[in-house]
Structures are given as C-alpha cells and as structure tokens.
C-alpha cells in the first residue's frame, strides 16, 4: 500500500450545517455538492475532504450507526505565515460559525497556534510553524520538535 | 481561511503499535519519528499524517483526555486502479496487522471498495472509483455520484 491519502471523509450530524460553514461561511468552492448526500471540498493537491452524514457513512461502511462518532479522535491542521495570520484565520472561522477551543497562543512545537471546532465538532488547528517547509515537489520537512 | 489541509493528526492509544503497522508493516518512511512523542508520515503532496498519543493530543489542544476519541467519526481513503488492486491492498494491510471491516465488493458510487481498520481503529477505505480523476495541477474531478 502506497503512503497516499486521497480523501478524508468526515461524518457530520447535519450536512446542511456543514455546507453553511464551509461554503457560505468560509467561501470554499465545492468540488462536488450533492445536497442530502455528500459535500466534497478540495483541500490540497489531489486531496478531497468529504463531508458525509454519519448514518450514510455507517451504511457505506457496513457498520452500526453508533460505530461512527462525529468529531472523533482527530484534528485537521492549516498552516499560516505567522501569529497574526493565526489570529485572523481564527476570527474568520468564528465569523463563519466556529467555536474556539484554544485561544491563539505560543505552541509547544516552537511556533504559535490555536484550535477551533466547526459546527459538527470537527477540530482544526491553525498554526504558524517556523520549522515546517514544503519542498518544490511537495515533500514536507519538519524541524526538530521541542518536547 | 484558504481551503487547505496541511496535517491530519490522529489520536492513537499506542504509538508503538501505530509505528509497527505503518512503518514496519506497510513499509512507509517516516517524515519525522520522535519515539514516545509523535510519528509523521507523508501521505500526499504537502500533506502529513500525524500519529499522536491520545493523551498528548488532548494536552496540546487544552481539552480533557476523554474529549479525544481514538478512531472516531472519520475515514481515510486510498484510491487504486481496479478491483484486483483493492484486494491486493487489503491483503497487504491485513498482513501488516489490519482488520477487515467490509470485504472487497462493488460500491454504491459505481466502483469497487473495501474498508479496514488499523490497529488503533483508524478506518481506511480502499477504493477503485472510475469517476475520480486528478488533473495535472492536482485538482480532483469526480463523476456523478450514484444514489
């Protein structure tokens, strides 16, 4: 199996609420929007974020609905150029309906970050990480992580 | 906020077990491996998958440990060229320690897919989707989704 992620599918309790946040609130253009079914958003080269009703995802997986936990044990991260940009992105997310989980502040990895939750409880970290570099071929290089 | 995901951080109950599956089992090369702390794997252009102890992630987020649910409401997807490749990838994942959730079979979207869970419970869909096309600039185009 190659080390490649093509699609991150997130189970949401309310697809219309998700659309209001990402499409109307943040202004992201859907890659494909099938109301009542699924909403796909392009979030990197060759990478989609799929927002899918929790019951529909459980059915697709062939598992019981209670086996799919919306807003579970994961976070998404969005890197920006500095502390002011962290604050600006968090403010934009809040304006679109997000809830702040961790106010913008210095981060343990040596940069600056914050966390917010979208209306479905999906957590985004907004970070300025001076040790994060993306090479021309897309390869990510990370500096030393500080305990 | 730009529509861009840089890092997907997954909370795992046992970081060593995660390393055994992804690095030793699947043979993926870490972008950064800090034993006892975090394991970063490159999973697309400019995109890392971060495997992080659940308690450490909770501390980083400033939330209670019980607020972080390992293997929660999301799936990762990995696209391949056809049904045989779906079966081969699932077999490779099982050999590395994965558990099959949905055996390889025709999918509702018109292709062929399967689901497995890694040792931490993180769910991967392995799919052949004839309607999924990635353009030269990395933009994803999806054909009509069938009910």
Image: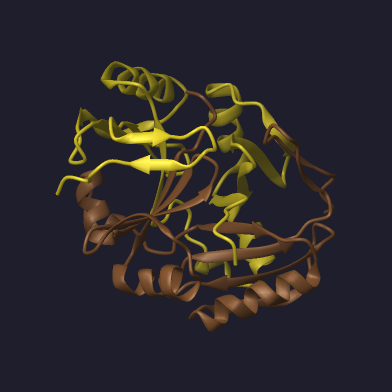
Chain colours: A brown, B yellow
Write the residue at 74% across / 37% down: B32
| Left-right relation of A41 to A116 | left
Write the residue at 34% across / 18% down: B85
Front-lying residue, A75 or A44: A44
| Position of A120 relative to A95 (above/below) | above
| Position of A40 relative to A119 (above/below) | above
**Quarter of the C terminus of chain A within the rendering:** bottom right
Whole-percent x and y of residue B1? 60, 67
Q: Is residue A14 visible?
A: no
Whole-percent x and y of residue B60? 69, 64
Front-lying residue, A130 or A135: A135
Q: Furthest-left residue in view?
A: B147
| Left-right relation of A137 to B73 | right
Whole-percent x and y of residue B119? 46, 37
| Left-right relation of B108 to B97 | left
Front-lying residue, B50 or A95: A95
In terms of image quadrants, where is residue A24? Answer: bottom left
Front-lying residue, B121 or A108: A108
In terms of image quadrants, where is residue B84? Answer: top left
| Position of A88 relative to A79 (above/below) | below
In terms of image quadrants, where is residue B106? Answer: top left
């Amino acid at each position: 199996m190659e080390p490649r992620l093509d699609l991150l599918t997130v189970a949401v309790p309310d697809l219309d609420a998700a659309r209001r946040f990402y499409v109307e609130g943040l202004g992201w253009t859907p890659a494909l929007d099938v109301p009542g079914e699924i909403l796909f958003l392009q979030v990197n080269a060759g990478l989609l974020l799929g927002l899918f009703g929790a019951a529909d995802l459980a059915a697709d997986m062939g598992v019981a609905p209670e086996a799919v936990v919306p807003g579970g044990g994961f976070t998404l991260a969005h890197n920006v150029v500095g502390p002011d940009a962290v604050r600006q992105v968090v403010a934009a997310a809040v304006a679109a309906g997000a809830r702040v989980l961790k106010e913008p502040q210095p981060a343990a990895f040596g940069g600056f970050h914050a966390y917010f939750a979208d209306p479905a409880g999906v957590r985004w970290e907004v970070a300025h990480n001076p040790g994060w570099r993306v090479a021309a071929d897309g390869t990510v290089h990370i500096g030393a992580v500080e305990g």
